[in-house]
């Protein structure tokens, strides 16, 4: 069955081909419905488009003048603006405020909402992405003789009818949380209905698209709405969601103007779920609860920011990438799935090295190791004077509580990397993390110490504890990544290392052979780097951790045992010149394995001599 929307869409597309008599009669009926606000919100947009098409068809001359069509449209649009302004003015009048101040029925605001929404839609009649080009094109086609080759909507392209300034000011009044009051009403005014505020943000956003002065004046207001505390807006998700959508649309039209508010938009990727007061909860209608929620705002942020990134309206500045990464481990499964599909789908296709070039930095950022140069370099990415750098405030993934989510984030990145990228990741981790921990001047060297001095002042000791914990978590996560099977060359996204035949089944014989040779070469390179570079670093680091009785010694030994299990012959050959160190390592590993076996409640997988992080990674991915 055809719905009302389908019928209106047909009129919008084909109404231009109606006879003048039928078009005039249909346009008159549609105007009456629009002016009396009997058209539901979800049909107003289609109704306006249909009315424009019918207005074009109502011309009965064989030669249709574009100027005459525009004049007819201007007449009924200006009349509709007047009706909308009158309805809003009546609502704001003293008598209406007193009448509605004691009413909680959202049904009283239906006419007001439709008036605001209609005003916004009317302001976009004739709009296209390039108004200048549309205006030139419309002037070249002033007189149209043949209807069969012209779409009615093209006759009004470039037409711009500015809403009355009084109407704009009235709708701007609705953006505030409270409505203006008079002296007789006292200082406490009526709270603006949330649905009315939400529609007002959308309407002002539509006005801004064709008014750069109004946009410059309003963009700060939209950004401020995103900055409000989550407890304060916990019952106004639709308002915040609409403010975010408007900023996204304005970023396309006025990129430089919105660029400085990217951080405010990026913060919506991790919307906190605040708890509204009992009074606020009672004021929420069931319809409003279904309109938007914290997850809705997050999904809008993911889709909007990814769209802007794909179209190059914004760049990966500051810590925006890591906010996206944190969204892949959100508590809401639908949000995390959407973020992962977007980040590892179109965004990764546009920039193939997106994950590999930010992996090491992700370990420092997710652990909030802000004092390290790698963190500071990541935070300063794309920094310039006129833009706002996205930060990482409000996200708490550090510490023991956030470890599972961090490992899940690492898995998301590693499972979407190529083998050559994994080789580079391991090399960077060994040099920039493990190697840096051996340097006395490095911030990671704090993690090699046994504890933080208690002789310092309380504030200084608190800062030192934070630095110590973040550095420790960075090294612990690094060992977990290096030990995990997902970091090995040849590991597929499904976790199976024996799928080369299946992976190359659809390739030609030559291509498959090259892929196999490439995989073997990368495996040899990875093994050589592991034995010649990483093992010596681990031996030196083991000595330092033992001397300080660091808790990281267990993570290091897990990695060493895993290396010995896989490459025992190569390691023995490497340490053949230092038999004492080799025997010491073998003794320590036997003791470590024995201790792990004696640990109650710990289960090992078959063929694994010790507990490694593979199980932890598996748990993090489920």
Image (tube, rainbow, N blue to C red):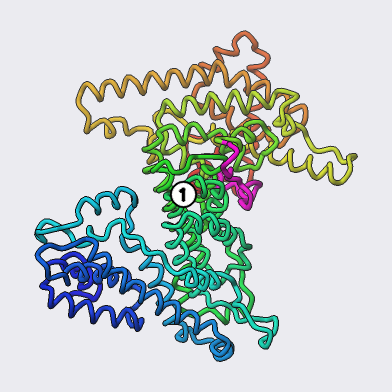
- Rendered image quadrant of residue 101: bottom right
Task: Identify the magenta region.
Answer: 383-406
Q: Nearer the viewer, residue 540 or 591?
A: 540
Principal secondary structure, stretch drawn in magenta: loop
Mark 1 secondary-structure assignment: loop
**393 within the magenta span:** yes
Counting from the top left corner in percent of width and height, residue 183 is at 68, 84
Q: Looking at the picture, tell me which residue is in the foreground, 284 or 560.
A: 284
Q: Position of residue 206 (x, y in %)?
A: 42, 62
Q: Residue at x 14, y 58 (%)?
A: 144
Residue 376 vs 272, above or below: the answer is above
261 to the left or right of 116: right
Please name the residue shown 44% across and 28% down the image: 421
Report the quarter where the N terminus lies.
bottom left
Q: Is residue 220 magenta?
A: no
Name the residue nearer the viewer: 337 or 236.
236
Badge 1 is on which residue?
254
Residue farthest to the top, as pictured: 577
Residue 492 seen from this side: yes
Q: Residue at x 18, y 77 (%)?
A: 24
**Residue 333: in sight, yes or no?**
no
The quarter of the picture where residue 452 lies is top right
Residue 170 placement (x, y as % from top left): 52, 73
- Quarter-wise, where is residue 612 in the image? top right
Where residue 257 sits: x, y (%)?
A: 52, 48
Q: Residue at x 27, y 34 (%)?
A: 502
- How packed mark 1 is, by other alpha carbons closer than 10 Å (few <14, some 14-19, many 20 or more), is some
Q: How many marks?
A: 1
Above or below for 216 versus 14: above
Q: Is residue 363 above or below residue 58?
A: above
């Amino acid at each position: 069955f055809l719905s009302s929307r389908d019928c209106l869409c047909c009129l919008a597309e084909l109404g231009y081909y109606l006879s003048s008599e039928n078009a005039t009669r249909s346009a008159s009926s549609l105007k009456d419905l629009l002016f009396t606000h009997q058209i539901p919100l979800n049909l107003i947009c289609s109704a306006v488009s249909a009315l424009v098409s019918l207005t074009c068809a109502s011309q009965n001359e064989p030669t249709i003048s574009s100027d005459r069509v525009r004049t007819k449209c201007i007449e009924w649009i200006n009349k509709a603006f007047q009706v909308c302004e009158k309805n809003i003015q009546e609502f704001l009048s003293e008598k209406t405020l007193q009448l509605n101040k004691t009413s909680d029925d959202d049904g009283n605001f239906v006419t007001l909402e439709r008036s605001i929404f209609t005003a916004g839609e009317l302001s976009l009649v004739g709009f296209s992405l390039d108004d200048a080009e549309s205006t030139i094109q419309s002037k070249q086609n002033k007189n149209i003789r043949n209807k069969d080759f012209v779409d009615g909507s093209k006759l009004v392209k470039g037409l711009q009818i500015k809403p009355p300034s009084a109407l704009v000011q009235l709708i701007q009044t609705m953006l505030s949380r409270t409505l203006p009051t008079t002296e007789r009403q006292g200082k406490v005014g009526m709270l603006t209905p949330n649905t009315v505020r939400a529609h007002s943000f959308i309407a002002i956003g539509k006005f801004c698209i064709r008014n750069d002065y109004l946009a410059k004046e309003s963009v700060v207001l939209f950004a401020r709405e995103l900055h409000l505390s989550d407890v304060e807006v916990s019952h106004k998700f639709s308002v915040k969601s609409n403010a975010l959508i408007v900023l996204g649309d304005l970023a396309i039209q006025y990129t430089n103007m919105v660029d400085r508010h990217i951080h405010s938009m990026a913060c919506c990727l991790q919307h906190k779920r605040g708890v509204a007061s009992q009074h606020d909860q009672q004021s929420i209608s069931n319809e409003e609860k279904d309109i938007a929620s914290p997850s809705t705002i997050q999904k809008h942020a993911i889709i909007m920011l990814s769209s802007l990134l794909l179209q190059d309206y914004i760049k990966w500045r500051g810590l925006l990438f890591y906010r996206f990464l944190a969204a892949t481990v959100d508590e809401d499964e639908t949000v995390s799935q959407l973020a992962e599909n977007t980040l590892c789908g179109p965004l990764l296709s546009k920039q193939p090295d997106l994950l590999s070039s930010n992996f090491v930095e992700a370990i420092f950022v997710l652990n909030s190791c802000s004092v390290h140069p790698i963190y500071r370099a990541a935070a300063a990415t794309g920094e310039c004077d006129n833009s706002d750098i996205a930060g990482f405030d409000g996200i708490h993934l550090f510490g023991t509580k956030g470890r599972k989510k961090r490992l899940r984030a690492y898995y998301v990145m590693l499972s979407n990397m190529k083998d050559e990228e994994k080789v580079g990741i391991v090399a960077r981790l060994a040099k920039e993390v493990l190697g840096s921990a051996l340097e006395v001047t490095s911030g990671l060297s704090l993690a090699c110490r046994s504890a933080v001095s208690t002789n310092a002042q309380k504030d200084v000791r608190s800062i030192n504890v934070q630095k110590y914990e973040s550095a420790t978590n960075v090294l612990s996560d690094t060992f977990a990544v290096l030990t995990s099977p997902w970091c090995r060359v040849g590991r597929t996204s499904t976790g199976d290392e024996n799928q080369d035949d299946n992976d190359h089944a659809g390739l030609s014989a030559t291509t498959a052979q090259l892929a196999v040779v490439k995989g073997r070469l990368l495996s040899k390179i990875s093994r050589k780097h592991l034995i010649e570079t990483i093992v010596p670093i681990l031996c030196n680091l083991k000595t330092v951790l033992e001397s300080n009785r660091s808790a990281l010694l267990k993570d290091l030994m897990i990695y060493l045992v895993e290396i010995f299990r896989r490459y025992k012959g190569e390691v023995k050959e490497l340490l053949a010149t230092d038999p004492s160190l080799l025997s010491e390592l073998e003794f320590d590993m036997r003791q470590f394995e024995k201790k792990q076996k004696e640990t109650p409640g710990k289960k090992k997988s078959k063929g694994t001599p010790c507990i490694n992080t593979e199980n932890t990674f598996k748990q993090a991915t489920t």
